[in-house]
Amino acid sequence: MPSETKNNPNKIIVFIATLICLLLILVPMPEALKTYKPDWSLLLLIFLAIHIPKEFNLGAAFLIGLLVDVAKGSLLGQHALASLLIVFLVTKFHLQLRIFPLLQLTAIVCLLIIMYQFILFWINGVLGISSPFQNYLGPVISGTIIWSIIAKLLSQLFLYTTSKK
């Protein structure tokens, strides 16, 4: 194994960012804003799949999804499956997504969050779990708004092995 991949600080940053995302999932919010709580882990997964796809794979996305399931107390594997499908799509097209301007990338991320929420909605529908529509729409709105901030913040932390342009 080359020394550049063994001593790569990106793994430590990913681990710390994942812990922060899990803590943000557990932080209670006021009742008025509870439906607008963004999917922090999904935003992190999308960023990682776009910018460092060689160091971040589908297994890690599935594991983070399982941790989100445990943290939220939802059906085990629900967020893991949705995260896995979204990260697969993003990883497949990461070279095209990497060159998009921030506004266009934000629109793509909005579509990805909608797809993620639809997968969760579909799984809950199959199981007969009903929940209001705003529980699915709220994270789409807040995640889209927060994406540009998270992308700018995280892009300054990671060391890239290939050019971003």
Image: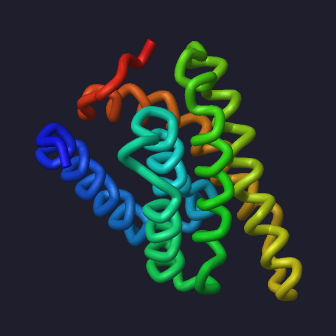
Tell me what residue is drawn at x 59 percent, y 50 percent.
87
The vertical placement of 157 against 55, above or below, is: above
Front-most of 90 and 92?
Answer: 92
Could you say where residue 86 lies in the image, as x and y percent from the top left?
A: 65, 52
Left or right: residue 63 compared with residue 138: left
Tell me what residue is drawn at x 50 percent, y 76 percent.
66
The vertical placement of 142 against 68, above or below, is: above
Left or right: residue 143 compared with residue 25: right
Front-most of 77 and 5?
Answer: 5
Could you say where residue 28 lies in the image, as x and y percent from the top left?
A: 42, 70
- When asked about the image quadrant of residue 90, the answer is top right
Front-most of 28 and 17?
Answer: 17
Tell me what residue is drawn at x 74 percent, y 68 percent.
120
Left or right: residue 24 compared with residue 92: left
- When asked about the image quadrant of residue 20, the answer is bottom left
Tell me what residue is drawn at x 40 percent, y 37 percent.
52
The vertical placement of 106 against 134, above or below, is: above
- When asked about the image quadrant of residue 102, the answer is top right
Left or right: residue 101 compared with residue 148: right
Quadrant the C terminus occupies:
top left
Front-most of 19 and 86?
Answer: 86
The vertical placement of 140 against 145, above or below, is: below
Which residue is outermost to the front? 1
